[in-house]
Structure formats: structure tokens, C-alpha cells
Image: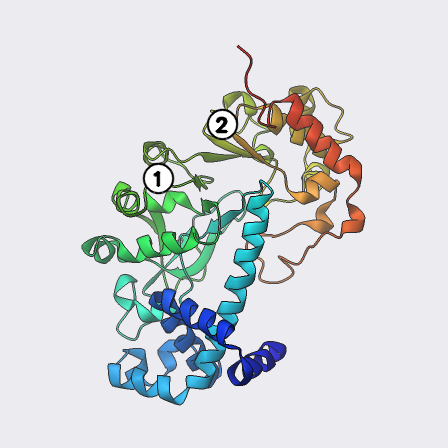
Amino acid sequence: MRHLAIAASRFAGHAGADDRAQFERFCASQADWLDDYALFMALADAFEQRAWAEWPAALVRRDPSALAAARREHASRIDFWRFCQWCFFSQWHALRAYANRHGVKIVGDAPIFVAWQSADVWAHQRLFELDASGRPRVVAGVPPDYFSATGQRWGNPLYRWAEHQRDGFAWWVDRVRRIFELVDVVRIDHFRGFAACWEICADEPTAVNGRWVPGPGAALFEAVARALGELPIIAEDLGVITPDVTALRKRFGFPGMRVLQFAFGGDSANAYLPHNYEADTVAYTGTHDNDTSLGWWSSADEPLRRHVRDYLATDGREIHRDLIRAACASVADAVVHPMQDVLGLGSASRMNTPGLGAGCWEWRFTWSQVRPEHAQGLADLCRLYRRDGTPLQA
């Protein structure tokens, strides 16, 4: 951040006409979110990162005269945050263009909820379930599940869906439009929340005590489709999936997700077993929330291991490769292989453990770990199972 501040200062004083014009065009084209974001970040800096509900009352309620005064007072810091975004967007679009030129598409991720301490919530308070002070009245999460005996209390404020519907889901339409300016395909996290979500009172310490409340259903995606057309969306439909969630996903042609680590230890009707897949599926050996395949295998009990060995006809000595092969051999339209499984790494390389607040999202691979046989192995599977674009022979 210190280096960005130096760069922003130099840009302010010495930018050439072309760079200045590009920056101004960016600010104008992104003003619908950038102006509120930059002001929010400048104010958060000024108030030492205190929650926005603790700012002066006129700023909390977004009094126009208070906002105008804040923009004047913090103009330099606002320009700094605009500059940071311009740098990111410029570099990202160059990266995406390079990837696309080489036949690579980028899959992005869109969480259904946003953080309370954010420009989104501060600037659009009527769209969220907040109390009179601006704090969340209820928050999001999921009930007890595979990952946690007390559920997951995410803490994000829930939406006032009636308010969103009243203005044609304009905030969502804008959000989805902006996401597709960055990526080619979007995975919408917690898709089931659009059918119904787990509502937890904000003063509850865990997610155990909550209730299911209806989401917007088809109305939201109809509004997005009217504004933006059909879009390449993957629906993250893991967890407690009821028939209405599946019907919503299929209505709009969104492929769902199947995770092989969830497939074993039960009976043949398990939806995560490859023989039960449908084509409109994205298959994963594991996701960012799972242990690596080697880590999962090492901690599995013997009945589960026996099921895996029988189903995959394997001795389990290279379980990561067995799972990758099983996903490739399935009818799923797309397959995702975590890099940890491609490299055959154990639990020390796990990406994320749900519910832990530290030590996650730190793993990185190094190019010294990647050998030609890793790429060759994936290429061979793609050819073997016609995932290389080879047309089907009549």
C-alpha cells in the first residue's frame, strides 16, 4: 500500500495526457460503484477502520451535504482509491485479454452475500436487513452440516428482497454486469440461498438457531436475463438441496456441482457418485473448502476406503489420480482439478478450512513443483475422454 501511495502521488503530479485521459474515462465508466467505494474507503481510513455505523450520524444516514463535504475534505484519498482500482482493472483486463487470445477462459466466483462493512451496504442500506442504527438485524449462514456441527455463521446481512424486486433487481443486474466485465464464466456461491436462506438473529453466536426464509427465486434471474441475456453461470448447489433449488437451477440452464469427496461411504444412490451425474454438471475432485484428495484419503475410515477401492477399482496408492480420472470419465460437461490434486499434495497444502479465521488461503504452488508429466497426464485424460474438443464420430 505504501508503494501504491507513492505511485498515486506521482501520477497526480506527473501523469501524461494519455494516462490521465484513460484514468478519467475509467472513473466515468465505473462511477455507479466507484464513487461510493472510493468515498467509503477514504472515510474508513479517516475513522481508523471503525464500523461505518459508528461514523458521524450524518455520514451514516448519507446526508447529501455531509457526503459533499466529505468528498471535498478527503479528495486526495478518494483519488488514491480510484487510482488503485484503475491500476487493477487495467492490469486485469490485459491479463484476461491475453488468456482469451490463447483459448483460456477465466472462471470467477460471486458470493451471494456481501460484507456488512462495505460500500455496498453503506450506500444501499434500504436493500439490506438492518436495524435503525445501521447494524444487521439478522445474518446469513448455514445450519449444521458436513463441515461444522454448529453450522456456519457467516455474519453477512441478509437482503430485503421485496426492496430489490421493487426496483427490478437493479442492484443485482449491475453487480452481474460488472462481474462479467472481469471474467468469462461465473460460479455463484450458495445458489440455494436464492430459493431459501438460513436466517440467524444477529446476536446468536452460532448458526444452530435459525430458520429458512424464502429468497427471490426465479424473479431475480428473469430480471438479469432481460437486461443481460443468457449468461454462463455455474450454480454452487452443495449442502442441503431441496427440489425447489434444483428446479430453479434447471429452469435457467445453470449447471450444478458434484464433488467426488462427498460420493463415498453410503449407497449407490448418492448423487455425487459419477454414475448418477447428468451432463449439466461441473465435477470436482474437491473444492477450495475440502481437504486435498490425499489428505481426505489419509483421514478416511476403512468402510469409506473400501467403497472407494471397490468403486474405482483401485488400491488407493495414487488416489488423487484415480479421482481425477473418474471425474474426467464422467458425463459432466466440465471438470475442475484443484492444483493440489494435480501435484499430489497432502493436507499441509489445503486451501481453506471452513470456520477457521486464520491460516487459510495462504497456499501457493511454485513452478519448481510442476513437471512436464503433470501437463502430459491431464492432456492424455482430455484426449482419452474427449475433453479436448474432438468432435463425436457418427
Quarter of the image holding residue 139? bottom left
How is the rendered protein coloured?
rainbow
Residue named by callout 1: 230
* Residue at 46% in and 46% down: 186
| Residue ID at (70%, 23%) | 309
Q: Is residue 47 visible?
A: no
Toward the top, the furthest residue is: 394
Measuring from the top left, give residue 26's x and y in whole percent.
Answer: 43, 67
- First reached walking from the N terminus: tag 1 or tag 2: 1
Q: Is residue 81 visible?
A: yes
Up-down relation of residue 351 to residue 324 (above or below): below
Three-letter code for the amino acid on which mark 2 is drawn:
Ala
Crowdedness near tag 2: few (<14), some (14–19) or many (≥20) residues, C-alpha within 10 Å: some
In what quadrant of the picture does the N terminus appear? bottom right
Q: Amino acid at mark 1?
A: Glu
The image's mark for residue 97 is none
Query: Which mark is drawn over residue 271?
Result: 2
Q: Is residue 109 left or right of residue 36?
A: right
Q: Nearer the viewer, residue 351 or 224?
A: 224
Q: Quadrant of residue 328?
A: top right
